Structure formats: structure tokens, C-alpha cells
Image: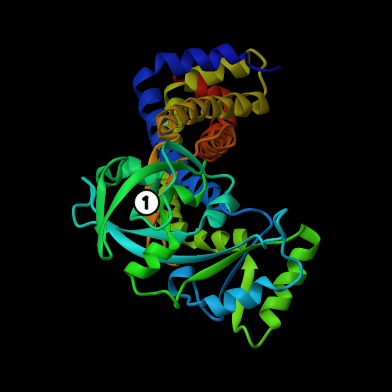
């Protein structure tokens, strides 16, 4: 014979203060865990959404990032002649030579400024990023000191908004457009004309990288192998997406620290739930004896008290999800150990994330409620009834 669920619900309501305090402790633990998960998922989504699936990135052999790479126009001309590169209807190879450098932008949160990627590209390079769209203003004009900024940069740095002027290189550059790259890393960059930027930085023959478009997925790896094996080029080639995937290491310290804090809080929440349920067992000895006299089995009592602990943790889990839900789509940034610049992204709180939080809360409830439930089930009938 099973004990009705309404019995457990009434007990939780009757002990409002302990129920609220224990549920709140579990909620805060879940909120910390989900905040870390949302941050890491947001960064991974941002980087996973960067790059075209057929784009190949070419850098100097051994270079850890575009910032530390040097390629020359001569190498570019040699690379464009390789087979397996897609072409425009005019026969022009779909390839872009690019220059990546860093500028420092100040923000209200960081007055000293932070490194932001500045990418010099050609019109072909911008066209190869078909996931990036101009949402405000216009595209920069070749040969002019004009920049287009990523949406996240414009949002986080007032000095980089439409119509503002940035001072770097040999003069001032006007912000003429804002680009939306969805959830990609392009939102963290500024784009300028490669020829004008190279001239300003005296880097006409020392550029950063080459982006190629493979004809199809089946030929892409063969193209990468040919470029890497060509000793005369002295370059490494990889898919553009794998390059961005490697940058998820930037979130590792945050993930480890957040997980550690969540584990410590989880242990505390588990003991809080256990203490609450032990107190409930102590106060309800007479009830337990009465339930046994009425014919309820030890297993039924164990299940009832364990279920009560799970209900308590479920309340905490739902509250924890509600606490972290406002973080969804909130913009933030993290420094990359690969590019030495900031990657802007948005927290991502999905239904799957919240299910993880609720499951975690239920696990805490089960761990905290099992021993008190077993203690309630082991109570002898006469011992319990003496407390009536």
C-alpha cells in the first residue's frame, strides 16, 4: 500500500520555512552550475558557428593563430593555382588574403581597454563569409580608412558604434557599418580594407592568412593535404571550423572554476536537504508509527520520504532554472589564449540546459533524502508510537 502524494505535499507546506530555505540552497547551486554551462555553451556555439564548412584556412607552418602567422602575396599566387579550389563564374578562384592585427578598445567596464581583432579583408573575403550581414550603415569602401564592426563589439564598446572614429595606424578610421554574424566569432571583430590596412601598418608583404573555398567536402581534405605537403609553401592548412573549435580552450578555466564552486555548493545543499529530512523524520515519529499501524509497509514509508526529498529538490531545481533564465542572450566576452584578443558571445540557456539543472537538483535530493528515508523506514512501531 502506497502513501498518497498529497501527504508529502501537505508536509512541505506545513514546514514552509525549512522547505523554502532548503529549496533556495538547491536553487542557488543549480543556478551556479547552469550559469557556467550557459557560458561554455554560448562560447562553443559562437565558435562552432564560425567559418564556412568548405573554407580552408592557410597559415605559416607552426603558427598557433592568424595573429602569429605571416604569409606573402607570392605564396597567395602559388596557392591559388592548386586544384580543388572553387571558382567564380568568371574563373577567379574563391580565395582571400587577410591581415589580422589587434587594436585596443575602451569600455565603461574596462577603462584600460581590451584587445579586439581587426581583420583586413578584400570584397571577396567578405563575400566568403555569407553568414555575416550588414545590419546598420554600409560596407567599407576599398582604399578608404573605414571599418565595419561586429554587432557584439558595437554593443559592448560605445567608441566603436556607427559614425564614431577610431584612431589606429596612420590616421582615423570611421565606423561606417555594423555587421551581424549570428552567433559566430565575426561579431567580435572589426573589418577593414586589406590594402589600406596593410599600407597603414607597413605590412604589404607580411600578411596573416589565406582563406580558400574547396570545391566540395570530398575534395577538401585532399586540398589540405596537398598544401601542407608542399615544402615550397611552408604552410599549414586546416578547415576554418577546426581552427575556431580549437579556441574553445579559452572557456576551460571558467568551466573548471565554476564546476568546482558548483560541486562545493552541491555538497552543502546535499547536507542541507539531508538535515531537513532527518529533522522531519524526528518530528514525525508518531506519524510514522501510525502509518505502520494502518498497514503501510517499510518500503512504502521509505519511498514516501524519498519522494518528499525529491519534490523539495524539484522545487529548488525549477527556481534555479528561473534564476538563470534572464542570462539567456546576455552578451559577454572572454579573452582567448589562442588569439590574445576578446571573443564576444551570448549566454545560451536552452531547454536542454534547464533539464540538466533539474536532473542535477533531483540527484541532490536523492542523495540528501535516501538516508533519512531509510531511517524513517527502520523505525519500530512501538518505539514510534511511544512518542504520540
Residue 151 visible within the image: no
Q: Which residue is mark 1?
A: 147
Circle 1: element type: strand
Residue 122: x, y in percent?
50, 58
Q: On the rendered structure, is 299 left or right of 97?
A: right
Name above or below for residue 297 compared with residue 107: above
Locate the N terminus by quadrant.
Answer: top right
Which residue is at the front of the view, 123 or 212? 123
Residue drawn at (73%, 77%), measured in percent from left and top?
226
Which residue is at the front of the view, 386 or 139? 139
Residue drawn at (36%, 55%), measured in percent from left and top?
144
Q: Residue at the left extreme?
A: 111
Locate the C terminus by quadrant.
Answer: top left
Q: On the rendered structure, is 179 left or right of 112?
A: right
Name above or below for residue 324 compared with residue 154: above
Residue drawn at (43%, 55%), measured in percent from left and top?
142
Residue 284 visible within the image: yes
Q: Residue at the right extreme?
A: 218
Which residue is at the front of the view, 28 or 192? 192
Answer few, some or many: residues within 10 Å of disc 1's Cα (few below 14, many 20 plus, some between 14 and 19): many
Residue drawn at (63%, 72%), measured in percent from left and top?
237
Task: Check the image and tell me how it is coloured.
Answer: rainbow
Name above or below for residue 274 compared with residue 49: above
Residue 81: x, y in percent?
70, 73
Quadrant hosting residue 194? bottom left
Residue 66: x, y in percent?
48, 69
Which residue is at the front of the view, 128 or 229? 128
Residue 261: x, y in percent?
39, 51
Amino acid at each position: 500500500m502506497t502513501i498518497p502524494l498529497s501527504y508529502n505535499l501537505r508536509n512541505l507546506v506545513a514546514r514552509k520555512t525549512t522547505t523554502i530555505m532548503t529549496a533556495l540552497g538547491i536553487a542557488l547551486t543549480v543556478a551556479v552550475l547552469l550559469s557556467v554551462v550557459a557560458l561554455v555553451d554560448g562560447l562553443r556555439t559562437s565558435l562552432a558557428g564560425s567559418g564556412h564548412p568548405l573554407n580552408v584556412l592557410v597559415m605559416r607552418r607552426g603558427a598557433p593563430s592568424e595573429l602569429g602567422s605571416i604569409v606573402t602575396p607570392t605564396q597567395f599566387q602559388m596557392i591559388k593555382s592548386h586544384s580543388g579550389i572553387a571558382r567564380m563564374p568568371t574563373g577567379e578562384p574563391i580565395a582571400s588574403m587577410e591581415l589580422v592585427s589587434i587594436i585596443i578598445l575602451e569600455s565603461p567596464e574596462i577603462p584600460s581597454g581590451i584587445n579586439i581583432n581587426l581583420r583586413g579583408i578584400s570584397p571577396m573575403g567578405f563575400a566568403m563569409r555569407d553568414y555575416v550581414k550588414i545590419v546598420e550603415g554600409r560596407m567599407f569602401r576599398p582604399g578608404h580608412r573605414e571599418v565595419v564592426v561586429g554587432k557584439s563589439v558595437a554593443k559592448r564598446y560605445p567608441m566603436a558604434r556607427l559614425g564614431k572614429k577610431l584612431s589606429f595606424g596612420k590616421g582615423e578610421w570611421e565606423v561606417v557599418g555594423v555587421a551581424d554574424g549570428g552567433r559566430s566569432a565575426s561579431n567580435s571583430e572589426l573589418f577593414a580594407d586589406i590594402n589600406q590596412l596593410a599600407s597603414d601598418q607597413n605590412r604589404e608583404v607580411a600578411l596573416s592568412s589565406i582563406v580558400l573555398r574547396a570545391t566540395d567536402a570530398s575534395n577538401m581534405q585532399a586540398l589540405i593535404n596537398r598544401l601542407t605537403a608542399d615544402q615550397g609553401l611552408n604552410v599549414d592548412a586546416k578547415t576554418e571550423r577546426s581552427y575556431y573549435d580549437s579556441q574553445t580552450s579559452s572557456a576551460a578555466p571558467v568551466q573548471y572554476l565554476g564546476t568546482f564552486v558548483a560541486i562545493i555548493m552541491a555538497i552543502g545543499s546535499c547536507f542541507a536537504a539531508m538535515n531537513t529530512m532527518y529533522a522531519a523524520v524526528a518530528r514525525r515519529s508518531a506519524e510514522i508509527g501510525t502509518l505502520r499501524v494502518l498497514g503501510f509497509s517499510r518500503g512504502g514509508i521509505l519511498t514516501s520520504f524519498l519522494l518528499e526529498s525529491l519534490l523539495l529538490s524539484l522545487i529548488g531545481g525549477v527556481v534555479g532554472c528561473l534564476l538563470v533564465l534572464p542570462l539567456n542572450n546576455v552578451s559577454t566576452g572572454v579573452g582567448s589564449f589562442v588569439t590574445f584578443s576578446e571573443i564576444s558571445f551570448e549566454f545560451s540557456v536552452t531547454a536542454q540546459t534547464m533539464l540538466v539543472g533539474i536532473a542535477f537538483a533531483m540527484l541532490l535530493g536523492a542523495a540528501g533524502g535516501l538516508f533519512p528515508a531509510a531511517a524513517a523506514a527502520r523505525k519500530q512501531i512501538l518505539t514510534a508510537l511511544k512518542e504520540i
